[in-house]
Amino acid sequence: MREKATIMDARQIDRALSRIAHEIVERNHGTDNLALVGIRTRGVPLATALHLKIKEFEGVEIPTGSVDITLYRDDLSQIAPNPVVQATELDFEIESKVVVLVDDVLFTGRTIRAALDALIDYGRPRAIELAVLIDRGHREFPIRADFVGMNVPTSLLEVIKVQCLDIDGEDSVLMMELDEIVRPHGDGDQ
Amino acid sequence: MPQTKKAEAGPIAPGEASSAAAGDAGLAAPGDLVFPADQPAASLKSKDLLGIEYLDADEIRLILDTAHHFKEISKRPIKKVPTLRGKSVINLFFEPSTRTRTSFEIAAKRLSADTQSISASTSAMVKGETLIDTARNIEAMYPDILVIRHAFPGAAHILARTCSAGVINAGDGAHEHPTQALLDALTIRDHKGSIEGLRVLICGDIAHSRVARSNIHCLRKLGATVVVAAPPTFMPCDVESLGVEAFDRLEPALEGADVVMTLRIQLERGGKLSFPSTREYFNLFGLSRDKLALAKDDAIVMHPGPMNRGVEIASDVADGPRSVILDQVSNGVAVRMAVLYLLAGSEAAKKNVETAA
């Protein structure tokens, strides 16, 4: 896999997150009953960034947590060994809240499907919305994002790599290229 | 190649996660793009968990870290995740057990596996069937994991050799009881942060205890100093070969202990023949408040259950503030969930499914 292009740098990511933070508040007419939930791994720092931005211009700290979707994956019978289970941290009731799920890249939609199942096991939110930094297309499920940082049309040879300061040492979005197509799902038809 | 991670406790640092992520297992490729590509994968080397003796420290840490995250599931309003949907777990209990069997059943059910429990009285073993024949018959029903408790050491090994399903040893005679040692280690880690460098005292019937044997292996692999105390009739000969310090009196052994683990006197296994009276045993080796005062001020008290109050442990110690006995029971479910998840997710287990299909 080789690097093809830088799609976003730190400032562009920051601007996109600022816009998304405003859109979330605008669309929900304020911050009442809002909650943010980042999907492990890279959705978590993005959710934290949105939390800080909303605090900055609304003066409100909205509850923020994280969810690990490992136990809800639909491909556990096809991959081995099993992925390492990470922590889910939801220290607040999601009952009757509007939960904004946050992830780095929206691709097939399978991660989001798993995250929806995980969230619903914790209670019945009034609504679930989805915020992603990059939407790269190729959906396999009827799932769309409510808030998108950037739409990046891709081929299946391309891979979007989001890097976060706390995890990877810098904030950036890179386009990588594979040598051969790896089917997103076993025998899945595109 | 199974990958294990190095972190001693808590969630893994995501940084090291990505370096371990590369799907070098042939089977791993399809999912990589669909789900977070940076999620590391790990499993145990064997399809079975027969004893702590056969695990390395990294595998033990992987089980403990996984169990740590599974604890949260038992505290949710809906205590169930779909992870092992469609997997069959069969509990074969040829010895009486309430706690361990219930714990395994709850663990399997919280992961959505189907469970079936067979106890000695309801099995065809009472009709004279051999263990191997029982195993072959059960194997013909394509279970994914077998949990076995048996009075004979090595019974789980026989099952593991006969069956392609994963086998978990839930206690084989006086040999090993690996999930008990793992839940003990998780409990110690919860209360002490880390196991490395701790001084752990195990007191009681060391010679006939599978709990003691598994705990000695587990704690030593994680870097603890293990001390054992028992009357000579309960002390295995050449116990030092297990790498422990041995005492024939409780008081000197208690000195400097961070953890005090008392074992059950197995009255039903002729344990009574090894000492004059339960009263004398309590006076000399029973953990009372006075004796506990000799250990470190923050020492915790553990017992694998079921307790004989007033024999190996005084009631006020068992129910006292230092006791973590009920935490051990809660952690038992999380540890067994972790073992089921890791064994069902191993490459060996998944290859079995492919060849059976």
Image (tube, rainbow, N blue to C red):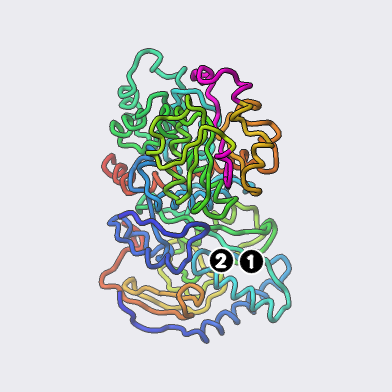
If you read the primary sequence from the N terminus, does the residue marked by circle 2 or circle 1 appear first? 2
Instruction: Based on the picture, tell me whether residue B278 belongs to the magenta stretch.
Output: yes
Q: Is residue A114 visible?
A: no
Instruction: Identify which residue is drawn at 40% across, 63% down.
Output: B34
Q: Amino acid at mark 2?
A: Gly
Start and end of the magenta stretch? Answer: B252-281
- For residue A38, which numbered disc appears in the image? 2
Q: Residues within 10 Å of mark 2 (few under 14, many from 20)?
A: many
Whether residues under marks 2 and 1 lie with C-beta atoms below 8 angstroms apart, the answer is yes
Tag count: 2
Question: Does residue B260 sit above or below A143 in this rendering?
Answer: above
Whole-angstrom CA distance, mark 2 to mark 1, is: 8 Å
Q: Position of residue B129 (x, y in %)?
A: 34, 17
Q: Using residue B184 as the reference point, say whether residue A55 is left or right of it.
A: right
Q: Using residue A38 as the reference point, say whether residue A62 is left or right of it.
A: right
Q: Using residue B116 as the reference point, say whether residue A65 is left or right of it.
A: right
The residue lying toward the viewer, choosing from A141 and B77, is: B77
Instruction: Identify which residue is drawn at 57% across, 32% down.
Output: B305
Question: Does residue B322 sit above or below A185 in this rendering?
Answer: above
Q: Position of residue B38 (x, y in %)?
A: 41, 66
Q: Is residue B120 visible?
A: yes
Q: Residue furthest bottom?
A: A11
**Where is mark 1, residue-wise?**
A64
